[in-house]
Amino acid sequence: GPAAGAEAAAAAAAADGEEAEEPAPTVQQRVRHFVGCVLEPLVKAAVVSQRLSEKVAGKATDKIMKRHADDDDVQFLVREYAAVTRLVTHLVDHYQQQGCE
């Protein structure tokens, strides 16, 4: 799946001095990965299912990208770490109240 591709890209980027075959991840891919990392402890603790995690991550990424459509890097994640975490927890809460598993 997409995660395997991201891992391969990371491995390629980590290989020192070698030309990485894959292009660098896009801002959207980086944001999606960051959101996934925010969700990971909830998934590991079995508070959030993998399926709900995917749904929340997609929605959160869309919302973040709408606000940062013109950004060409993800430096904003440093400033907005807390806001992104709040958005993710809000979406989890919202979907769980709707009965999404």
Image: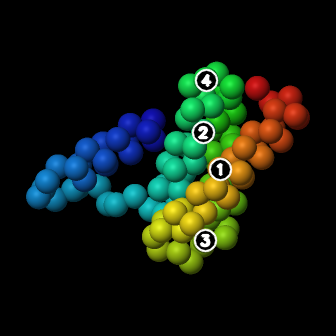
> Where is residue 33 shown, x and y percent of the image?
50, 48
What residue does disc 2 label?
39
Label 3, secondary structure: give it. loop
Asked if residue 59 can be seen in this view, the reply is: no
At 53% across and 75% down in the image, what residue appears?
A: 71
The residue wearing badge 4 is 45
In whole angstroms, how far apart are the C-alphas of marks 1 and 2?
Answer: 9 Å
Mark 1 or 2: the one toward you: 1
Tell me the CA gap for discs 4 and 2: 10 Å
- Residue where numbered disc 3 is placed: 68
* Quadrant of residue 45 within the rendered picture: top right
Can residue 77 be seen? yes
Q: Measured along the vertical axis of the image, is residue 44 above or below residue 52? A: above
The percent coordinates of residue 56 (x first, y second) are 69, 43
Circle 1 residue: 85
Q: Which mark is residue 23?
A: none
Q: Secondary structure at mark 1?
A: helix
Query: Between marks 3 and 2, how big is the CA–CA gap?
Result: 21 Å
Q: Residue furthest right?
A: 98
In the picture, measured across the screen, residue 95 lies left or right of residue 67, that is right
Nearer to me, 37 or 82? 82
Residues at discs 4 and 1 in contact (Cβ within 8 Å): no
The answer to whether mark 4 and mark 2 are in CB contact below 8 A is no
**Viewer-proximal residue, 1 or 16?**
16
Colouring style: rainbow
Furthest residue in direction left, as rendered: 17
